[in-house]
Amino acid sequence: MLLMLIFLDIDGVMVPAKSWQRPELLNDGFPAFSKKASHALKRLISDDTTVMLTTSHKSNYTVDEWRNIFSNRGIDVKEIESLGNNERNLSRKDEIVEWFASHDISEDFIIIDDDKSLNSLPPFLRKNSIITSPTIGLTDNDLKDASAILNKWYHFA
């Protein structure tokens, strides 16, 4: 079985960042995910997927609370982890580079974020990155890019 690791940002990926519009909050107090982003992420995730949260919100909730946040939005994530607390205020790019420098991974991975600084990731990381439009978030077009990165085909329905 092939394992997959998704490095996932929330703002600008699952929750479009529209400065002129406040995001709708659900009963758990966290913003609703866009329907398009939820649809795309659901198709990308399988039972062998670990979601590695890179969002600035990552330390605000426990793993169980994150699992509930995703579940309340119709997304079943069995394995959730997060990058460590960013106590040194590293850029997202540096957080990810540092994580990879200290971890050996054998699974397929993809990085999904709206942070344009990720365009300057080292090539082996950049080629596995999808940079979303912050005002739109994750879409099926991004899923097509993920399919090319991971050499898998996701059916679009």
Image (tube, rainbow, N blue to C red):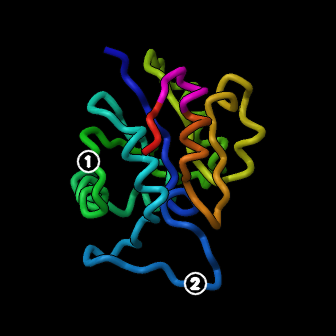
Q: Is residue 122 magenta?
A: no
Q: Residue at x 61, y 63 (%)?
A: 136
Label 1: few (<14), some or many (≥20) within 10 Å? some
The C terminus: image quadrant: top left
C-beta proximity under 8 Å, tags 1 and 2: no
Please give the label number shown on residue 105: none
Give the magenta range. 147-153
Q: Residue at x 46, y 51 (%)?
A: 85
x and y, in percent, of residue 146 in the image: 56, 34
Label 2: few (<14), some or many (≥20) within 10 Å? few
Q: Nearer the viewer, residue 90 or 56?
A: 56
Q: Residue at x 57, y 59 (%)?
A: 137
**Exactly how many numbered labels are in the figure?**
2
Q: Residue at x 32, y 43 (%)?
A: 80
* Residue farthest right in this picture: 120
In terms of sequence position, does the residue under pointer 1 or pointer 2 come before the other?
Answer: 2
**In the visual, does 16 lie left or right of 133?**
left
Q: Amino acid at mark 1?
A: Asp
Q: Amino acid at mark 2?
A: Gln
* Element class at badge 1: loop
The N terminus: image quadrant: top left
- The residue where tag 2 is placed is 21
- The residue where tag 1 is placed is 76
**In the visual, does 4 lie left or right of 69?**
right
x and y, in percent, of residue 93 in the image: 66, 43
**In the visual, does 9 lie left or right of 3?**
right
> Residue 27's quadrant in the figure?
bottom left
Whole-number angstrom distance, CA of label 1 to CA of label 2:
27 Å
- Residue 145 against residue 3 in the figure, above or below: below
